[in-house]
Image (tube, rainbow, N blue to C red):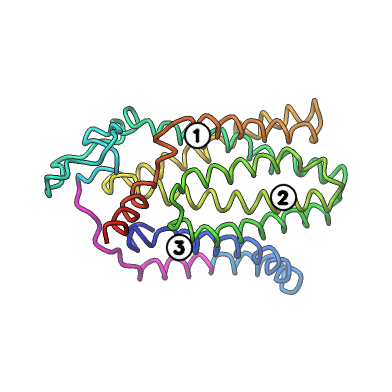
Amino acid sequence: MPTLIKPDQLPAGNALSSAMMQAGSLAGPVLGGILVATAGSAAAFAADAASFAVSAVTLAFISARKTAAVGEVPEGATADGSVCAGAADAGSDQPSPAGPTLWQLLRTARLLQVLLVVTIAANLASGGTFDVALPALAHARFGAAGYGALLACFGAGALLGTLYAARAGTFARPAIVAMMAFLAMAIATGLLPFLWGLPGAAAAILILGTTNGFGNVVFITLIQQWAPSQLLGRVMSLVMLASLGSFPLSVALSGLLVRHIGPSPFFPIAGGLVVLSVAGALGQREVRMLGAGKSAAADQTTVRA
């Protein structure tokens, strides 16, 4: 996305992209079910293959915009990747001849270290919640129809959250706003099994989906704007590794916990893990100030004008 649109358009671009993915996730099972029922499973697999072919063709026509020069360092980071109070030397209009390597950035940038820890902790909680505890809870209380309703509520909430994330550029402290959304997500997760049956669970998971979709888009955008242009792909790959790489461990541990304590107690445990990770992140100034520099500069420009 950063190679297609300007930096100030990233919140809206990421929100639109995520919203389309959520809309596809909502429509896909419905359309697939209709196709299987009317034309058979072979036709569904053929349609799936054709959809990838269409994606390949559309990607071939995408042209990237010109990006910043190699050697650019993120706001608040020195050429070796360490975080500092201000940006690079304002008196020089030339980029650094050599930017930091990914290892230097990971070793010295406290912000990236904290965000990776939060990502791992949050996904350790969410993987087991959605793929182990929620199906077990639905099987015990709500049945297949109730489980489908819960998934639909989550998808609808995520769609709403990603669309609202397009306004992230208007927040003075976007990282703090996103962290507050994750705290609300954690509270909704912990309360989900205890809120008056299926209607209460559906309301909780709607909030969960909304805050999750909003927070994810905001933080992905902030990381894209912060990372050096020559390392952007590697930084995002590292974030995705922290996210998806925790899934096997998450579902394995969650399966053991749910088996021994049941699905209901698992939800407050998962929510508590997210609360702890978010609280730790908010204790770091680098996280609280992420994305705040541009808003502050804009405010100062307005005052001077």
Task: Look at the numbered discs 3 and 1 and tell me whether their residues touch, using CB distance below 8 Å.
Answer: no
Task: Look at the numbered discs 3 and 2 and tell me whether their residues touch, using CB distance below 8 Å.
Answer: no
Q: Distance between the residues labelled 3 and 2?
A: 24 Å
- Amino acid marked by disc 2: Ile
Which numbered disc covers residue 282?
A: 1
Q: Quadrant of the N terminus?
A: bottom left
Which numbered disc covers residue 181?
A: none
Task: Look at the numbered discs 2 and 1 and tell me whether their residues touch, using CB distance below 8 Å.
Answer: no
| Circle nearer the N terminus (3, 2) | 3
Q: In which quarter of the image is residue 151?
A: bottom right
Q: Is residue 288 rendered to the left or right of residue 60?
A: right
Crowding at dot 3, Cα within 10 Å, few <14 / some 14-19 / many 20+, comes out as many
- Residue at 40%, 40% (x, y): give it: 289
Q: Which of 171 and 66 is in front in this view?
A: 171
Where does label 2 land, which residue? Answer: 205
- Residue at 53%, 68% (x, y): give it: 51
- Residue at 80%, 35% (x, y): give it: 264
